[in-house]
Image: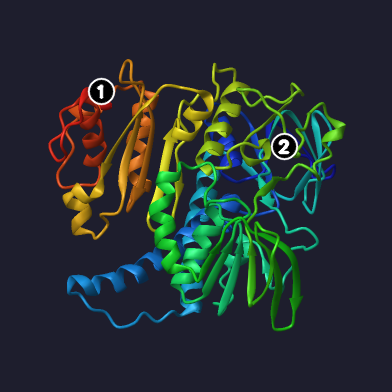
Amino acid sequence: MVMGEMELTCEVLVIGNGPAGYAAAFRAADLGLDVTLVDPRSKPGGVCLFEGCIPSKTGLHLAELIVDARQAAAMGLHFAPPRLELAEVRSWKQQVIATMADGLLQLGARRGVQLITGRAQFENSTTVRLEHAEVRRVRFRHAVIATGSRPVAFPGTAFRPGSRIIDSSQALALADIPDSLLVIGGGYVGLELGSLYAAFGSRVEVVEVGDRLLAGVDRDLVEPLQRRLSGLFAAIHLNTRVLTLTEQDDGVKVRLQDADGGTKPLVVDRVLVAIGRQPNSGDLHLDKTAVQLGERGNIIVNGQQQTADPHIFAAGDVTGGIQLAHKATREGRVAAEVIAGQNSGFDVRAIPAVVYTDPQIAWCGLTEEQAGKEGLAIAVQKFPWRYSGRARTMAAADGFTKLIVNPGDGRILGVGIVGRNAESMIAEGTLAIEMGALAEDLALTLHPHPTLSETEAEAAEIFIGSPIHTLPTRRGDR
């Protein structure tokens, strides 16, 4: 770099330092390429680390401890009522974030990745101009766009500091615990943050325009969670629309409309809008490149993360589709490997997903609802956790483990789990699908007892007709 010209040349420029971006940068550096990473943040991690995945899990862990402390009384273990000190909670959250961000910073530095704090905009297919940075311009052979996504605002409103209408990032800042909170959206973000605030003492109501929570997740997996949330939340309004939001000095005035057209007024302290996210592609000046966008502003890529411009790749939320950090990380790796000349592609068979509520829901591969829509023949077997010794010891017997299997050859096509620690169990199901495993393979894999993981083997044993802890089904019933 010549400082007088304030210009830099590199082989790979990565724009965005979230999971997709730093994965692309680190992998490209490991493959011997000269890499520059640009982002408005001074440390890697992106929304996931600073405003999303990690902050939400620190809060949800505390919420889980509060709930566990209450439930422990039925087991003979009594605690004093929990006292929430928000300043200490925020300090703990920031300590977790800072430790992880510093670790990523060191990993990048040791790999020789040059990190520039600034905002990039394309001048053409091989050059970007930087704003708010010491370097004025970067020329590159290939670029990877990994600029992520941002929350969608409720029509007619905008997220702004100090507003009572907030997005997920503002909710995780934990400025205070409102007496009442309305969550717009019955997806995983709304339910996770609603659960957090309810455990912390807020009166939470959820509004969902559809007829169920967690649309797209099999109904049977959602039912145990919905029963639990019906007791945790003050109200769950299904088939209901929010017509207007009016912010006032002392709250937010809301007008709801039910399926019959009737309206209902509501006043709450805060409103959390969790109705989806949109790709951050609008400020990149992509019109100066050959990159093509989809209807929702997502960057269109192929299985090698290549855009329509041969110099430019994209990965993560900005490409649309399922917005999960682990998917973004894999896509970033793929982009780096293709740029380095390797035969790589995003060819996973199963993408695991987790809802970190209580109980948790996790699934991967084919779902029952998807199979029904596609007219696929499947066999479904469930192992209820009321027969699990480990679940009983944890007072978590309302969960179950479900296998979706090809009835012809016994191949595992999908796995669904609802219950405690589903987050850690779904990886075995994902591996089974990736390996093309049969239900018999899972059944014959020795699982430790007593654990929740053995419920996956138990469900497989039901399919092959050799269960121990449930009665065998007749062959015609499978």
Image point (67%, 47%), residue name: 149
Q: Residue furthest left?
A: 468
Circle 1: residue type: Gly
The answer to whether mark 2 and mark 1 are in CB contact below 8 A is no
Q: Residues within 10 Å of mark 2 (few under 14, many from 20)?
A: many
Observer-side mark, 2 or 1, equals: 1
Image point (31%, 22%), residue name: 437
Q: Nearer the viewer, residue 114 or 297?
A: 297
Q: Quadrant of residue 156?
A: bottom right
Q: Which residue is mark 2?
A: 298
* Residue 195: percent from left, percent from top: 47, 64
Image point (27%, 27%), residue name: 477
Dot 1: element:
helix
> Dividing the image into 4 quarters, which one contains the C terminus?
top left
* Residue 443: percent from left, percent from top: 21, 29
Report, in whole angstroms, how far the alpha carbon at label 2 lies from the one at label 1. Answer: 47 Å
Q: Quadrant of residue 299?
A: top right
Q: Nearer the viewer, residue 386 or 139?
A: 386
Dot 2: element:
loop
Q: State whether residue 429 appears in this view.
A: yes
Circle 2: residue type: Asn
* Residue 24: percent from left, percent from top: 58, 35
Q: Which residue is mark 1?
A: 476
Q: State whether residue 357 appears in this view.
A: no
Q: Nearer the viewer, residue 336 or 317?
A: 317
Left or right: where 230 falls relative to 275: left
* Residue 422: percent from left, percent from top: 35, 47
